[in-house]
Image: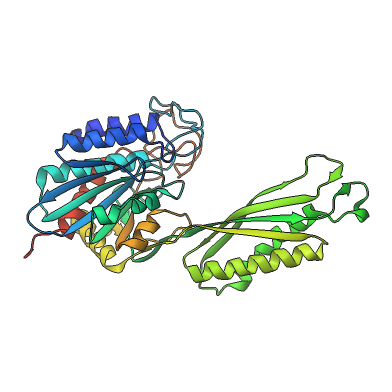
């Protein structure tokens, strides 16, 4: 570990031990602001709730870029037993946002020292990414009006990608996140008299099965999508057929046209199957988060900057994930790019980690602190490349 960032390793682990949920990142935001101010960076607090923006200027250019890190934790009980494990029951940094904060602070510190760029860098520390509303909150609070920028960038650690490697491409990076809830209403009665009821549990089971045909039979083979039913609730007595059953889940796509098509098929299938079982179905389809679509120009800048710093062998094409990211809302408002930084496969994890892989949203997840100097170098290279003085 680079001794220059030993204090940021300690800060990262302190944030990990004191996780805060969406829009409650008061302690974390205070630490971020203090870290920026220690570097002589101008600080703006309370943007979109608990969001923080640092402003660093160099040279004379009016050009500007933004770099974003998310700050919130997840409602997961941590299984790790190391000293910096979460002190808050039912809440942990299982997605590495503590590490994202540390990497961006490390980059801010380096850039404040070197200032080998011409323009302004905005360091954006966002609340509420896991809720899917933090980016919108900052945008609605005037993020891009108060801090106008030609491009905005974000990075996420990615388990399975080797330490020191990156992935970036133009086009889709992550999927849109949509929620479906289907209530099936039938006729309840005695479970021993099935001929006298219209069983919503049976109808719900058939609907779950039928919905799996949408991607395989109703979409062009080249289109990627996922329809996953994750909950089924019905009844509370072993001897009673209930009146209603409710199923719910998520739909992931890379385009609004595919989302629209899937919604249409869900309505068709759910109502038709329910009717076939003597029931009715009501469908609630909620669009939570758009797909994260990288703009070609900023993606090329990221690839060029990372290649110049880390070599072409460490900059790989990004294969879109079906996970979602509310950075999508920033990309809808402003050109930009989202890229991955490798978090390895957990081979370096010390004693105290829980069982299971080093994967995101896993109770034994932990961010690899070796990424902090790597992240600092990546953010520095990006700022120096995107805001290079004229005549580079």
User: Quarter of the image containing the N terminus?
Assistant: top left
Quick check: can you spot residue 311?
no
| Image spot of residue 312 (x, y percent) | 24, 60
| Above-or-below relation of 258 to 323 | below
| Above-or-below relation of 45 to 63 | above
Look at 43% across and 50% down and name the residue there. Answer: 133
Quick check: can you spot residue 13?
yes
| Image spot of residue 377 (x, y percent) | 21, 47
Viewer-nearest residue: 330 or 315: 330
| Above-or-below relation of 25 to 63 | above
Look at 34% across and 31% down and name the residue there. Answer: 27
Look at 59% across and 66% down and name the residue there. Answer: 263
**Residue 264's quadrant in the figure?**
bottom right
| Image spot of residue 167 (x, y percent) | 33, 57
Look at 25% across and 36% down and name the residue there. Answer: 33
| Image spot of residue 74 (x, y percent) | 47, 39
**190 left or right of 90?**
right
**Residue 98's quadrant in the figure?**
top left
User: Quarter of the image containing the C terminus?
Assistant: bottom left
């Amino acid at each position: 570990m680079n001794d220059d960032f030993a204090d940021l390793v300690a800060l990262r682990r302190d944030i990990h031990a004191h996780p805060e949920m969406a829009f409650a990142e008061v302690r974390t935001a205070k630490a971020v602001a203090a870290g920026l101010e220690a570097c002589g960076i101008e600080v703006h607090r309370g943007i979109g709730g608990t969001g923080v923006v640092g402003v660093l200027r160099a040279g004379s250019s009016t050009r500007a870029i933004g770099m974003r890190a998310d700050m919130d934790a997840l409602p997961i009980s941590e299984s790790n037993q190391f000293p910096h494990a979460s002190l808050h029951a039912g809440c942990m940094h299982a997605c590495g946002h503590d590490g994202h904060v540390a990497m961006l602070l490390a980059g801010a510190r380096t850039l404040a020292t070197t200032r080998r760029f011409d323009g302004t860098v905005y360091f954006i520390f966002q609340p509420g990414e896991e809720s899917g509303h933090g980016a919108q909150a900052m945008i609605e609070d005037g993020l891009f009006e108060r801090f106008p920028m030609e491009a905005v960038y974000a990075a996420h650690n990615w388990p399975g990608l080797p330490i020191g490697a990156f992935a970036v491409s133009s086009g889709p990076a992550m999927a849109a996140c949509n929620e479906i809830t289907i209530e099936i209403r039938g006729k309840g009665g005695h479970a021993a008299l099935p001929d006298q009821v219209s069983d919503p549990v049976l109808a719900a089971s058939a609907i779950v099965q039928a919905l799996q045909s949408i991607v395989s039979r109703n979409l062009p083979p080249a289109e990627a999508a996922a329809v996953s039913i994750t909950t089924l609730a019905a009844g509370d007595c072993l001897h009673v057929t209930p009146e209603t059953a409710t199923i719910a889940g998520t739909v992931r796509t890379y385009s609004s046209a595919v989302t629209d098509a899937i919604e249409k098929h869900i309505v068709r299938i759910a109502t038709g199957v329910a009717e076939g079982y003597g029931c009715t179905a009501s469908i609630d389809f909620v669009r939570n988060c758009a797909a994260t679509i990288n703009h070609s120009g900023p993606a090329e800048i990221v690839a060029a900057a990372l290649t110049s710093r880390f070599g072409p062998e460490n900059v790989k094409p990004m294969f879109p994930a079906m996970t979602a990211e509310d950075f999508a809302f920033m990309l809808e408002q402003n050109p930009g790019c989202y890229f991955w930084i490798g978090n390895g496969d957990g081979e370096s994890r010390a004693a105290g980690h829980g069982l299971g892989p080093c994967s995101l949203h896993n109770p034994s997840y932990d961010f690899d602190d070796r990424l902090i100097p790597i992240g600092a170098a990546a953010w520095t290279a990006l700022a120096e490349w995107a805001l290079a003085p004229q005549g580079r």
